[in-house]
Amino acid sequence: MKTRTAAIGFLFAAVLLGASGPYTTRLSPLDTRAIKTVAVISALGNTFLFERVPAKNFEWLGPPNSHFLEISDWAIDPVVMRTVSAALAKRFTVKPIVFRPADFSTWDYSNLKSAALNLNGDPAIDAYVLILRDWRPDEIGYSVHWVGGLGFYRKDRPSGRPKLGVFASYRVVVVDALTGDTIASRAALLPGNALPWLPEDAALWPKTPNNLTDAQRATLAAAETKLIDATLLPTLSAMRLAH
């Protein structure tokens, strides 16, 4: 059942992201020689998803219960951009870029090309390194649904305790600044190609996102920071963007 769900999921991913290739999961030696100057864009951390899968036999008949919380005050994107810029500066010249996060918050490879070409960046920039939300099969409760971006997941069960986890589903994409074509794209995963997530207690789940206490917000923000810290630099290294 899990294998079948995963196969359907990968097909869905290809359609959802508008896979247009050709690109690889890391820069080629030719790419690393050609790319001298980059700009970093992070559009990962302004919203936080609460996804709840109810306990029912035919879960594929409807979507999960989903709600969003605005979390720009967690300052995840600025921290990610500083971390990535510092790592890339050891290999490339890193230039600042002005962008609208909304242009990159919901994306596929086709509109990503348009958004990149619409950037009014320094002509010296060879490539954009983007940190974007990604959609992945549910590896927490193994439902038929997907998780995306930063969020808190809950799967209720007819009997027994619910399964809960905080997740960070994102990827790093390198785009040619001149043509808008994708050069390389790689999901940020834990060892074993696993979705980055951490188990949490049901007591952390709020009645509504707006009912979160300051302590609950701090706990969720700390969990996301831990997941990003565990996956971001290893992903850059695997893509040959950083040493």
Image (cartoon, rainbow, N blue to C red):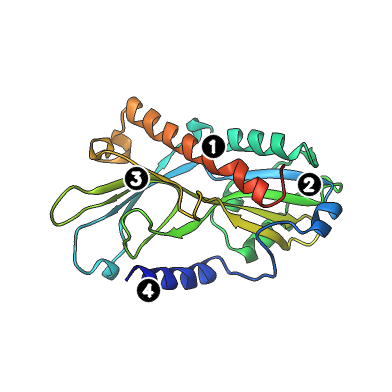
Residue at the extreme top of the image, as rendered:
215
CA–CA distance in space, label 4 to label 2? 44 Å
**Sequence-wise, which precedes: disc 1 or disc 3?**
3
Q: For the point 28% across and 36% down, which residue is it? A: 204
Question: Disc 4 designates what residue?
Answer: 4
Along the horizontal axis of the image, is 216 left or right of 115?
A: left
Amino acid found under the numbered disc labelled 1 = Asp
- State the image coordinates of residue 182 (x, y, percent, origin top left): 70, 61
Amino acid found under the numbered disc labelled 2 = Gly
Question: Disc 1 designates what residue?
Answer: 229
Judge whether 2 appears above or below 207 on screen: below
CA–CA distance in space, label 4 to label 3? 23 Å
**Numbered disc 1: secondary structure:** helix
Asked if the residues shown at circle 1 and circle 4 are in contact, with their CB atoms under 8 angstroms apart, the answer is no
Q: For the point 39% across and 28% down, which residue is it? A: 218
Judge whether 201 appears above or below 104 on screen: above
**Sequence-wise, which precedes: disc 4 or disc 3?**
4
Question: Disc 3 designates what residue?
Answer: 165
Could you say which is closer to the camera, residue 122 or residue 26? 26
CA–CA distance in space, label 3 to label 2? 38 Å
CA–CA distance in space, label 1 to label 4? 32 Å
Please state which of the two labelled residues, at mark 3 or mark 2, is closer to the viewer.
Answer: 3
Asked if the residues shown at circle 3 and circle 2 are in contact, with their CB atoms under 8 angstroms apart, the answer is no
| Few, some or many residues within 10 Å of mark 4 (<14, 14–19, 20+) | few
Along the horizontal axis of the image, is 211 left or right of 81?
A: left
**Numbered disc 2: secondary structure:** loop
**Sequence-wise, which precedes: disc 1 or disc 4?**
4
Question: Disc 2 designates what residue?
Answer: 121
| Few, some or many residues within 10 Å of mark 1 (<14, 14–19, 20+) | few
**Sequence-wise, which precedes: disc 4 or disc 2?**
4
